[in-house]
Image (cartoon, helix red, strand yellow):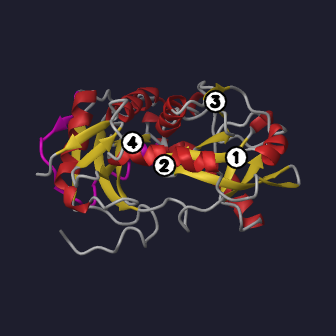
Amino acid sequence: MSVKPDPLTVPFGTVFCDWMTTARSDGGPFDYRGSPEPFGDLSFSPAAHVLHYGSSVFEGLKAHRQIDGSVAIFRLDTHVSRMVTSASRLRLPEIDPGLLHQMIIDAVAANADEVPDPPGSLYLRPTLVGTGADIGAAAHPAPSALLFVVNSPVGDYFKGGIRPLTLQVESSAPRTVPQFGMVKCSANYAMALGPTLDAMAANEAIDQVLFATDGDITETGASNFFLADGERIVTRHLDDSFLHGVTRDSVIQLARHLGYEVEERAIDPEELVDWSERGEAFLSGTAAGVAPVGTILYSGKTLTIGDGQPGPNTLRLRQALTDAQTGAAPDTFGWRTSVRSH
Ligand code: COI
């Protein structure tokens, strides 16, 4: 293994493991050679479909060092199936779930020595891009494609570790377009960038923009949004307009297991005023984990959530998620896939 900086001290996603897996398709099944290859630059034509027409989808999932020293991937099959859906929504070549599952396992097995101890983890980034050289294919699917899995040892996504985040509610600009809301495609992140950077330029305390287009709170650019108190958690009901977070789903299942009521429903930003006085708010995402929210800037008001510090219910759910990921709790929901190192 090459010498790398401590993942807990560098920005999230800037250090990469030595091995990756790749497979190519000429429109038909992906051709995977069945073993990892050294991490390195990829090559495709300057006329590649992805560079002109944005044919790119990806996943974000994690492998965790278990308390017994082994390595397990968290919610592998759920991520695989979401990526299969994303690829099909962008009319990219169909991914065989079994193949992607194997490519992810092979990459993690090859990089197993690089999985940090908790609170670090290995972030896995399967990506699929249209590579066909055809700049006439604006209204055609990418004629060929490249599927690859790269791994990055990571610490916290938000700089500064566990700390109360500041959100700005954005009531007009949407995060993305309705037909792509639930697709994990690269274009969605490009679309959220302008409003996010504008908000951050106006106020450097802002960590994330909370999209609430036309009074409907959905998600931030990088995570789903929850409200919580001692009895319930509340989050936006699923539809095609926003990303169906796997961590969102994990939090919901863990919360039910712990005895919380779960309300999946529309959330009007006006509700935030009341919740700020008596409840908690947090974000959920693979990268973000369960991240407490301390302040929400909404309609000219600064809402301090509770006392502005991470609340007990948020911390309880965060711990339940960490325990499920790292093997400190029984695998009640069958979420962990063990990986043997090569
Ligand atoms: C993830 O949480 O895995 C994501 O893909 C969000 C990204 C902004 C890091």
- Label 4: which secondary element: helix
In the rendered view, would you say 28 is above or below 273?
above
Residue sitting nearer the eye, 295 or 217: 295
Q: Nearer the viewer, mark 3 or mark 2?
A: 2
In three-dimensional space, the C-alpha distance between marks 1 and 3, rounded to whole angstroms, equals: 29 Å
N-terminal of the pair, mark 3 or mark 2, is 3
In three-dimensional space, the C-alpha distance between marks 3 and 2, rounded to whole angstroms, equals: 34 Å
Q: Position of residue 196 (x, y in %)?
A: 67, 55
Which amino acid type is marked by label 3?
Answer: Pro
Q: Where are the magenta residues, as a range?
A: 29-52
N-terminal of the pair, mark 3 or mark 4, is 3
In the drawing, does residue 153 fall left or right of residue 310?
A: left
Please name the residue that numbered disc 2 is placed on: 319
In three-dimensional space, the C-alpha distance between marks 2 and 1, rounded to whole angstroms, equals: 16 Å
| Residue 23 appears in the rendering | no
Please name the residue that numbered disc 4 is placed on: 324
31 falls in the magenta region: yes
